[in-house]
Image (cartoon, rainbow, N blue to C red):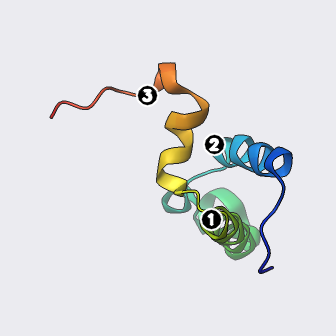
Amino acid sequence: MSEKINDDALQALKIAFIYMPKAIEVNKFEYGDRYQTVLEHIQIVRETLLLNDVDPEEVYGEINPDGTPRSSY
């Protein structure tokens, strides 16, 4: 996928992304033999966000600004 997605689809992807497990949380114990597939799916979503000029690390704060801790510096 190398083209940008429309605004509605991007918003839906951002919302879905905040409910996805973090890659560091994915392991064979929790996900069984599917753990590698789950990691690949997470990577695809992250790449799509980046392709659309969205920093995956900032998505949670954008979607849930009230639940994001304030910076201390």
First reached walking from the N terminus: tag 2 or tag 3:
2
- Marks counted in the figure total 3
First reached walking from the N terminus: tag 2 or tag 1:
2
Type of the residue with mark 3: Thr
Marks 1 and 2: in contact by CB < 8 Å? no
Type of the residue with mark 2: Ile
Can you say which quadrant of the picture contains the C terminus? top left
- Please state which of residues 40 and 9 is positioned toward the viewer in this rendering: 9
Mark number displayed over residue 18: 2
First reached walking from the N terminus: tag 1 or tag 3:
1
Can you say which quadrant of the picture contains the N terminus? bottom right
What secondary structure is marked by label 3? loop
- The residue drawn where x is 70% and y is 64% is 45
Residue, disc 1: 46
Distance between the Cα atoms at labels 2 and 3? 12 Å
- The residue drawn where x is 69% and y is 46% is 14
Mark number displayed over residue 56: none
